[in-house]
Amino acid sequence: MNEPRGECRDHALAGGLLAGLFVLLRMLPVTAESFSYDYANYMSYFRAMQDTDWQTAFELLPLTFPYLLIPGGGAFELGFVALAKGLLDWFDAATTYALLAGVSVGLRTFAMRRLGLGWWWILLIQLYAITLFEANALRAGLALSITLMGLLAVLRGHRLLGLLAFVLGVSQHLQVLLFCVPFIVFSLIPTQWLRRWWLSAALAPLAFALSLVALALGSDIDSSKLDDYAGQASGAAGLNLISLISLLFVAIAMVHALMRREQHSPEAEAVHMLWLRALLASMPALSLLLFGSAMAAVGDRAWQFALVILVALSGSMASTRSGRWSRNAVLGLLLSVALLNTLLRYPLSNFFAPPLPYEPISPLWLVR
């Protein structure tokens, strides 16, 4: 970051507030079910929450934990239910959705800027993230934004606060575990060990291989929630252009992270090690994206989550001339293809319509 820390904090706060307000005002007038694939699901679920009192909602918790089943609605994570239902006691379903989406995008914008990401990159990744998360998978969007705040806390040396943020993120969407658990494991490895390039180089394929083993074992788990996801097709999973460019980006990023040995300040060292640990923690999501065809939607969503985090932390990669060029080229290509798919070729929402053309999207009547 070239700005003084206080000035950067002020700019990040202003940017977060403006982004959150924009999303709030955009979401408030939404009434059409064809706004996105999942918006109608959330409206139905929120209305079921409004018709359910707190005592009834929590009576079933011992049988469904960490999910909470709402009669007439579905089963969502406990933390998300508590947050949404608290707002629903005061606002209607549409306003509650808009408030949650606005807070999520505002927090994510603030965290990205404080993590050192430039405004143009923030704009690009937010076009992608809002379409995938706040316009569709609201729980995952909230979990992602909270996780980024946790990473910011870790970077500032507040590890306990970061851990609490991870737990709060998991309470919004359990899939956060696919990133947070590996990240915590790699955070337990002393920094002086990770400075040895050969150890970090060995950890990357090891994490990738262990993820494939876990994937094979996980396919035999009897879980109705996993069955729901396994039954959902996803064109982004498997060997395709997105997954191959993603693999190339992670490989190049790992090479640059391992080559950069000398850090000029403790702050630069902290940023670099956070970046390296995030790259290692992204290996399970990448392996699911490439080979998790049996649970395509899980791998797809896990990598989308990890990609936003990697973009947010990629300022470390751009600290050298070769790293900056590599990031701009490969990550720029990856986001260009991803945005072309999600906004134009296969539109996932009408959040940005106009100026983008409006598409008659048929909602998926499945609570996920």
Image (tube, rainbow, N blue to C red):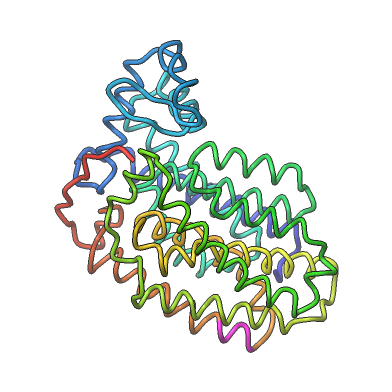
Compared to residue 314, the image places residue 110 above or below, namely above
In-front residue for pair 244/115: 244
In the image, farthest residue toward the bottom = 322
- The prevailing secondary structure element of the residues shown in magenta is helix
Q: Position of residue 183 (x, y in %)?
A: 65, 56
Q: Would you say residue 19 is visible in this rendering?
A: yes
Q: Residue at x 77, y 54 (%)?
A: 156
Q: Is residue 239 magenta?
A: no
Asked whether residue 131 is in view, the answer is: no
- Residue shown at 75%/80% (left/top)? 198
Query: Residue 184: image x %, image y %?
Result: 69, 53
Image quadrant occupied by the C terminus: top left
Question: Start and end of the magenta stretch?
Answer: 322-326
Residue 68 picture location, percent across and down? 43, 26
User: Which residue does the image show at 38% across and 25% down from the upper left?
Assistant: 69
Q: x%, y% of residue 222?
A: 40, 41
Picture quadrant where residue 267 is located: bottom right
- How many numbered marks appear? 0
